[in-house]
Image (cartoon, rainbow, N blue to C red):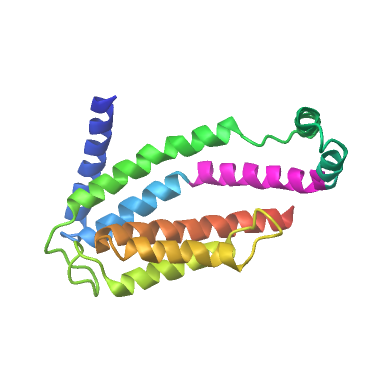
């Protein structure tokens, strides 16, 4: 398993190095190209997972009145309550824990971890990109740009629940700002490129759901 992981990271490192050479030594462009390409390649899988999540949420919303009725009827009988709820879920095809979606998420994690590792190791101490003087250090402008992209991602994402409030929109942005401020600008570029693809993905999903 270790050898497979090393080979995978090594392949990404080779691709990253070739991109840096292709762009005439621009580490920044190589980071943006590699991270966005990987995210675009995984978009079909990500969209399928998102569609499943929204389909399950729609089923749950329709079942809510029936769930409340079952809770009121069997509130003093926990075992019967669980049994009736499970029966209701099964009858309508609702799966609280979808194994397929969980496996799909796990399948993506090694890819992003490998990409993160390659970019982290490939950032030169003297690398410059646009206004960023050193890709190995944090940049305040890039940090706020990534925060803005995170906010836009939340705004264009189809809500999983009608009860989604302002906190659900703002909290991811605050958390992102906190973490990005402490990492190198090179990894920040990776984050920004991935966020841009995420925005496109959410717009596509939102339009699909509106048609339905």
- Location of residue 79 in the rendering, given as x and y in whole percent from the top left corner: 76, 28
| Residue 157 placement, left or right of 122 | right
Of residues 130 and 195, the one drawn nearer to the viewer in this rendering: 195
**Left or right: 63 with respect to 176?**
right
Chief SS of the magenta region: helix
Q: Position of residue 51 (x, y in %)?
A: 63, 45
- Residue at 69% in and 60% down: 163
| Of the pair 80 and 120, the residue shown nearer to us | 80
- In the drawing, does residue 69 fall left or right of residue 127? right
Question: Considering only vertical position in the picture, is 145 above or below 64?
Answer: below
In which quadrant of the rendered view does residue 92 lie?
top right
| Residue 24 pos. (x, y %) | 16, 60
Residue drawn 23% across the image and 26% down it: 3
> How far across and how far down the image is residue 7, in percent?
24, 31
Q: Is residue 103 above or below residue 68?
A: above
State the extent of the magenta-drawn residues as a range: 43-64
Q: Residue at x 40, y 56 (%)?
A: 194
Against 203, residue 17 (above or below) is above
Q: Tell me the quadrant of the picture where the N terminus can be found.
A: top left
44 inside magenta stretch: yes
* Residue 37, magenta (yes or no): no
Residue sitting nearer the eye, 194 or 87: 87
Res. 25 image quadrant: bottom left
């Amino acid at each position: 398993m270790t050898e497979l992981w090393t080979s995978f990271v090594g392949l990404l490192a080779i691709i990253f190095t070739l991109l840096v050479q292709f762009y005439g030594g621009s580490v920044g462009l190589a980071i943006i190209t590699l991270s966005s390409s990987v995210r675009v390649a995984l978009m079909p899988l990500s969209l399928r997972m998102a569609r499943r999540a929204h389909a399950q949420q729609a089923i749950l919303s329709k079942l809510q009145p029936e769930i409340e009725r079952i809770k009121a009827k069997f509130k003093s009988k926990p075992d019967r309550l669980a049994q009736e709820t499970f029966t209701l879920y099964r009858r309508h095809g609702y799966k609280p824990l979808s194994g397929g979606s969980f496996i799909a998420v796990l399948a993506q994690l090694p890819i992003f971890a490998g990409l993160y590792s390659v970019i982290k190791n490939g950032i030169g101490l003297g690398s410059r990109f646009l206004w960023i003087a050193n890709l190995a250090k944090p940049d305040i402008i890039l940090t706020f740009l990534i925060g803005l992209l995170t906010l836009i991602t939340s705004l264009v994402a189809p809500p999983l629940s009608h009860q989604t409030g302002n906190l659900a929109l703002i909290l991811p942005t605050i958390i992102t700002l906190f973490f990005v401020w402490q990492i190198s600008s090179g990894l920040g570029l990776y984050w920004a490129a991935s966020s841009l693809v995420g925005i496109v993905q959410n717009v596509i999903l939102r339009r699909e759901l509106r048609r339905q």
